[in-house]
Image (spheres, rainbow, N blue to C red):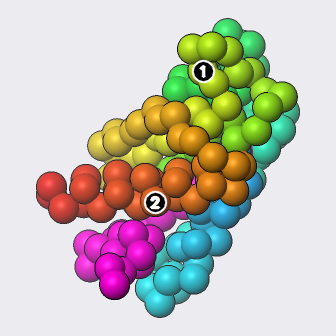
Amino acid sequence: MAEPKILTCSKLIAEHQLTIAFAESATAGWLCSEFALAPESGQILKGGIVCYDASLKEKILGVNPDLIKQYTPESEEVTREMAVKLKGVIESDIQVAVTGLTSPGGSETPEKPVGTMFVYAFIKGKPAHFRRVFKGTCEEVIHQTIDATAELLTNNLNSK
């Protein structure tokens, strides 16, 4: 059986002697918690902030409210800004931010349906990101987002 993507990613982060921090909205801390379960967590994990409500993106991270109004709390632009601002809150080599729509009731549209997830990371200042539309329940969308984030980081770290 293949090793879970989070474990592969955690090992690679440790091999590169890097640290990681998270700013999570739609995944509500689940991504950070998956990294906390890895054997290397003590070496690599700095921490995470859950800012599920847009007001916390503003108050804790300092995301400009106008950016949120213009693009919605669940957007690539806001996710990128969360990752940028995270470094000032939790010093780390890798900053990962996540927003998205795991269930109805957010900013979904026909162009941005439920299941749309945004991940934006900076790996030693280099951006890596995706926008994907996943299918399934809220929990399934979160699991797919976690795996896709681990893949994104792994692929970028392997290309160094």
Between marks 1 and 2, how big is the CA–CA gap?
21 Å
Residue at 63% x, 24% y: name it: 113
Horizontal side of residue 15 vs 6, given as left or right? left
Residue at 41% x, 76% y: name it: 4
**Three-letter amino acid code of the residue under disc 2:** Asp
The x, y position of residue 96, in whole percent, is: 50, 51
Looking at the rendered structure, the secondary structure element under dot 2 is helix
Task: Please identify the quadrant where the C terminus is shown.
Answer: bottom left
Seen as rendered, the residue at the extreme bottom is 39
Query: Who comes first in sequence, dot 1 or dot 2?
Result: 1
**Three-letter amino acid code of the residue under disc 1:** Lys
Of the pair 103 and 31, the residue shown nearer to us: 103
Q: Which mark is residue 147?
A: 2
Query: Range of the magenta residues?
Result: 1-25
The x, y position of residue 42, in whole percent, is: 52, 85
Q: Which mark is residue 44?
A: none
Residue at 62% x, 55% y: name it: 140
The x, y position of residue 56, in whole percent, is: 81, 40
According to the picture, the residue beneath numbered tag 1 turns out to be: 112
Seen as rendered, the residue at the extreme left is 160
Q: Is residue 2 above or below residue 127?
A: below
Horizontal side of residue 63 vs 7, given as left or right? right
Looking at the rendered structure, the secondary structure element under dot 1 is loop
Q: Count residues near mark 2 (Cα–Cα under 10 Å), then give few for <14, some for 14-19, many for 20+.
A: some
